[in-house]
Amino acid sequence: MNPISRRGVLRGAGVAAAAAATPAIPWSAAAAVAAAAPPTASPVLDAVVFGDAASERLHNVTAELSDVVAGGLGQSARVLNPRTPADWWGGSVTCTLRVDPVATNYVTVKFWGSDLSPKADNDWRLQLFLDGDILGWFDQAVVDNIDLIDLAPRLPGRFYTHTLPLPLSRTRGKRTLEVTIRAMGRIYAYGQNPAGFYYPITTPTRGIYRAYTHTAPHFTPAAGDVYGTTATPTTRPNTDAERIAAVRARVLADQNTLLYTKAPSSFDGWAYLTLLEGYFWADSPAYRNPDALERVCQAIDGRYRAWLADDAVLTASDQQWEGFGRVGLVLSKAWDELQPALDRDVVAGQVGLANLGFEVGAATPSNWSVPGWAADGTIARDTTVAHGGTASLKMVSAGQTILATPSSRSLVGPGELTYSVWANTDGVATAPHVLVQFWDAAGTYVSGSPDHHVTTGSAGWQELTKTVAVPAGATQYEFWLVSNGGQTVWFDDVTITAPPPVVAGAVPRRQAYRDMMLASREYWRQHQRHYSNQAQFTAIGIYECNRGLALLSPADAWPEAKARRWVHESLGMVPWRGPETADGEATWTLGHDYHVATPKGLTRELGYVADYGEISGMLVRMYEAVTQGKGGTPDEALRKRMVEMIKVRSWFRHPGEDSEGHRGMRIETQIGWRNEPYPGDLVYVQRTDWDGHPLEAVAVFQDPDLTGWAHQMIADGQLAPQLDLLVSTSLYTRVGLNAFRFIAQDWPAFQKLTDSGKRLPGRWGAPDFVFTDETDACVAIKRGEEIFYASLYWRAKQGVNDMARVHLLTPQSERSATVRETSIFAKDPRNTYTVQDWACWDFAINDSGQVSTIPAGGFDYPGEKVHQVFAGEKFYLAPIPADVPDPALGSTTVGVEKVLVGKAPMYVLAYAGYTVVMNTTTDRTVTYLPECGTRARDLRTGRLVTPRHPVRLAPQTTLVLYDPDAR
């Protein structure tokens, strides 16, 4: 067999040319595959300096809604302005640039690395156009924006570049090309309609400094093109104590709200679990308080009633793909303590009133409020006067009526209600009094009890007690404390004994909770997801429900091993079986050897993802669900796999700086597939998100590497900024549960751990490394003071696209790019995908085979229709295992994401002197003939590589070469 010449492939190729060039080459163990030496960095073909009059004249620059500014290091730039009135589209700048009529061309744009968005609402995008047609897509596509600004600076004090490839169809035979950069507004990726997805641009964009054309994938600026340097980053001052105190204050406030103020029927799963956790925390007002357990059950009662009224509460509510798993989690966490509450019936609303001793609150007691129509005076929580405990309610009338009542009504049944309250006056007051008011189920006032006044002439504490009949038709009541006439009174130690509400068709809680968990487990086992994080949500919900059933209704529970397999499956420990049929048979929709996580521990969505791949919080939840609570048992294999999955993320941490120039470690996002911000967040061990915080996995698994990396974060002063979310109002109850466990569990546990001295491998000055993952087809490489990331399997959702995403960093520079690569496999011209004429997305959502509510290619965008420069190009489909019935999982939508068909069996990527040759197969060995210089080295072994000397690549292995002569 003749070897393949990569140089020949690239010379005449379009998007699919690499595929077309090798249609007849079979795969076999004896095949010898060769690639030419990677191209050296070519000089810049052309460059326009925006804001420089001479350069702009030379390049026929025209601009709309644009200003010239003096930017970073005094260099000129153009900003693009919003329209009036504000629109999705903003200003634009157009220029003419030289291109090579034969070779593959690239466009690179220069940006100032200190620029950042002042808020998320201002995350403007810049998009390239060629001769009026759009180059690539708005969002999450193989060729994306030329820039997407974010809340953090990419490279403070220096310039960086981003590079995109041009299709040969637009440059072949041409010497020049018209290039336009257009401003666009913000995209909210989770918007469910065009108005919620596209937001207008309202302020000027970041500066656009230069645009270049060149033919080598790696851009090298010309001499004299200044990019800047900075001093070594400084250490951020430590503000941990202040931030942790703020989180603690938030947690205590949440506990008071959940116990005393908020109606349990309004609780979501995060809220009632937070209150339950408070029952076991000595610093909470809920600590060992049976009222807390009753309120947790009332909250679940509310979810039960809502579910009976609407099935979507199980499938599409705040529970996400977890269903009613948290109900099972509550039972396993507090099975013994919940027994009295479980013996009651489901209630139709709140039963009982809270904070009747006024012990909880600040200036005023929690759960007590003053209606606007009876607010002539003040109420206060007085800690200097009390009948019992440490506080009372002080009420001062300013002349007319002042009234205090609990913030929500309580349900009541027919019979008699008895109340008791202690009042303290000066012995002269006659106005202070108490009463009970009743309403029916529709909220219509029924009647009230007689006013019960204090006794005149009795100074100090006196008890006011009375038994009143609940009026016919009344189903809820309020208890009122009143004063007027300018008189002052203290109230304390209210007790109320009320008849329980009557519920038509009463359902015992044990039956209701059993029905919830059984329905949830049965639904979600038949609707398992295929993206890693979604599969994990589904799996933990199924497992938690089964744990609850094992306690509440053992006859309905699976054996523990069967339930636990769902957890193991969601972590890639065993093959993914797909959704089950109604009778419990696995469907194996992606074959019998598909795993939702790679052997090395990365998630699959479909390739490497940054933020969505940060699953440490989910791993902790799974681990604790399996090993803790009533019936929990150890699982060392599970623990080992989870720690492996957390540690593998360390290769994707690189040095960065915060907005003030302080050092930190950032998560690698440039090569990520889904909704990635640039730059990535500051992350060491675990990313702060709605469900997890930086020390959670460290505290739970107590692994020496994780502990050392966390101490590196604290030494850098970067813990406090990562706790900001925990005091925010974003997804309040969900984040509240996260904040609770930080304060009550994980921070105390972490403080007991000693620093192991371990530090993240990607820091400057650390030893070199090569990490490769052949399932996600990505690499992370450190070579001296340089880090190179690449995703060879890059957003290839319908076929092999022959493009890779790369990110190259040094302490002073940063380059990111989408570049051409070579894929090698037998390509069938009858098995291709044709790129659609879309502008927003280059795909249609695959909702695990279910119909998506979002149209293929994304929502229609505002303004004029634009056409896609890649439309009509063809991608060849990679071979898939014979037992995969349908990589589209049943979807027939044009452009839908398909699993496996976009990942080539073999890749060859050349960039900046690096050559990455990856065998992604699991059963084939290939031979590679490197065409390189005599100074090329194998970065794994450090050995020099002999040009054209055969190198065998076993299945799931990668060769990484560096040739300084190819730089």
Image: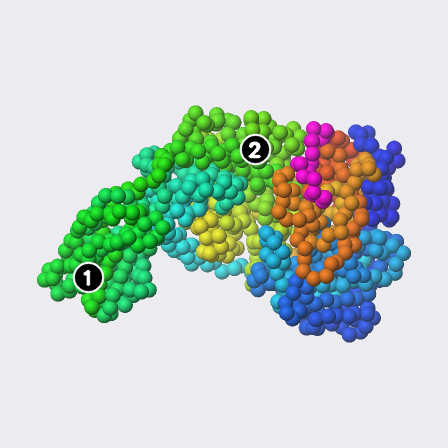
SS of the residue under disc 2: loop
Residue 955 image offset from top left, x and y in percent: 72, 32
Q: Of the numbered discs in the image, which one, if any, rests on residue 432?
A: 1
Residue 753 image offset from top left, x and y in percent: 44, 44
Q: CA distance from mark 1 to mark 2?
A: 62 Å
Image check: 127 left or right of 548?
right
Q: Quadrant of residue 377?
A: bottom left
Image check: 693 left or right of 255?
right
Q: Of the numbered discs in the image, which one, if any, rests on residue 526?
A: 2
Residue 567 in view, yes or no: no
Seen in the picture, residue 316 relative to 810 is either above or below; the reply is: above
Furthest residue toward front: 472
Three-letter code for the amino acid on which mark 1 is drawn: Pro
Q: How many marks?
A: 2
Q: Of the numbered discs in the image, which one, if any, rests on residue 145?
A: none
Tell me the quadrant of the picture where the N terminus can be found. Answer: top right
Magenta residues span 881-896
Residue 65 in view, yes or no: yes
Depth order, front residue of 185/104: 185
Q: Quadrant of residue 809?
A: bottom right
SS of the residue under disc 1: loop
Residue 532 image offset from top left, x and y in percent: 59, 40
